[in-house]
């Protein structure tokens, strides 16, 4: 079953590359990966819009949630149950924010496998020989460093990707910090207070986790990650453009 899925995806990438060949020549396959990522994000976009609507609805419920937290401050389990019942009453799913990221993960893993496997469907994987400006799509950062270093022909590709990821992560970092400053989390009591405090410090830095991902995965998968992460930042800025920073959810890494 999985073999047929990978073979079908390989065929899709090959056909997209053939269509893009007149425009991108030797980098047509890389362009096909980026186009494929855009198609996946377009397919998931309706869910992202639904997530934005849900987040705005949760923002409107914030005063009622604060009342429940105050009312049941000494009984965390009862407080959690009351909040979940409130969300159910208003038809708000606490998992809706995760769906866009979860649904696109299979596409990422297929891309990762396709450009990591020497064979696809029992045949030699010809896609491994395709390149982006001389850098193999199946290669990794360590391979680029071994062929001229970071300033070599292959290394420069990764420097560009790192620059894009850093710019997007910095944008998300600032946005998340502003959101958390505008809507501070109510002080937690008991043994969970330390965990909540640590999470509030780590959360703004999560966007930078894309950097080690790009460093480790094959170049084709890195293109998927960078394209998807950039899409997420732009999409969220658009969807939450008319919302106070406190209403915006923490940006997803993908």
Image: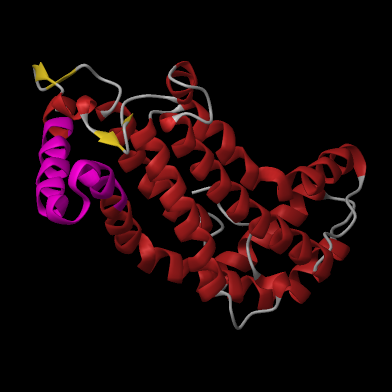
Q: Quadrant of residue 87?
A: bottom right
Colouring rule applied to residues: secondary structure
- Nearest the eye: 85 or 92: 92
Q: Specify the farthest residue to the bottom.
A: 242
- The relative height of residue 136 versus residue 242 in the rendered view (above or below) is above
On whether residue 26 falls in the magenta region, the answer is yes
In this picture, residue 123 sits left or right of residue 56 = left
Question: Which of 234 and 8 lies nearest the eye of the viewer?
Answer: 234
Percent from the top left, x then y, of residue 27?
A: 25, 43
Whole-percent x and y of residue 112?
34, 31
Residue at 67% over, 74% down: 59
Question: Where are the magenta residues, as a range?
Answer: 6-34
Q: Main secondary structure of the magenta part?
A: helix
Using residue 129 as the reference point, say whether residue 244 is left or right of it: right
Q: How many marks?
A: 0
Which image quadrant: the N terminus? top left
Residue for point 25% across, 19% down = 117
For residue 248, say whether it is visible: yes
Give the image quarter of residue 72: bottom right
| Rendered location of residue 111, percent (x, y) | 30, 35
Residue 78 pos. (x, y %) = 76, 53
Is residue 95 positioned above or below 196 on the image?
A: below
User: Residue at image x 67%, y 54%?
Assistant: 170
> Could you say which quadrant of the image residue 121 lies in?
top left
Q: Residue 170 vs residue 53: left or right?
A: right
Q: Is any atom of residue 91 visible in this view?
A: no
């Amino acid at each position: 079953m999985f073999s047929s899925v990978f073979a079908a995806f390989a065929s899709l990438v090959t056909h997209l590359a053939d269509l893009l060949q007149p425009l991108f020549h030797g980098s047509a396959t890389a362009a096909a990966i980026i186009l494929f990522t855009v198609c996946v994000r377009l397919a998931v976009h309706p869910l992202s819009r639904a997530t934005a609507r849900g987040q705005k609805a949760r923002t409107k419920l914030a005063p009622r949630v604060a009342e429940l937290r105050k009312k049941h401050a000494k009984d965390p389990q009862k407080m959690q149950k009351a909040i979940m019942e409130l969300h159910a009453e208003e038809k708000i799913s606490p998992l809706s924010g995760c769906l866009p990221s979860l649904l696109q993960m299979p596409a990422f893993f297929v891309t990762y496998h396709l450009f990591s496997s020497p064979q696809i469907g029992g045949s030699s994987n010809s896609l491994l020989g395709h390149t982006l400006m001389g850098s193999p799509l199946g290669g990794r950062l360590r391979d680029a460093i071994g062929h001229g270093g970071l300033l070599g022909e292959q290394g420069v590709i990764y420097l560009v990707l790192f620059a894009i990821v850093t710019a997007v992560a910095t944008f998300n970092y600032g946005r998340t910090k502003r959101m958390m400053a505008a809507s501070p989390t109510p002080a937690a009591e008991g043994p969970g207070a330390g965990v909540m405090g640590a999470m509030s410090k780590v959360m703004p830095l999560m966007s930078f986790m894309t950097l080690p991902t790009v460093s480790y995965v094959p170049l084709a998968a890195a293109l998927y990650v960078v394209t998807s992460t950039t899409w997420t930042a732009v999409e969220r800025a658009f969807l939450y453009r008319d919302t106070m920073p406190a209403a915006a959810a923490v940006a997803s890494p993908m």
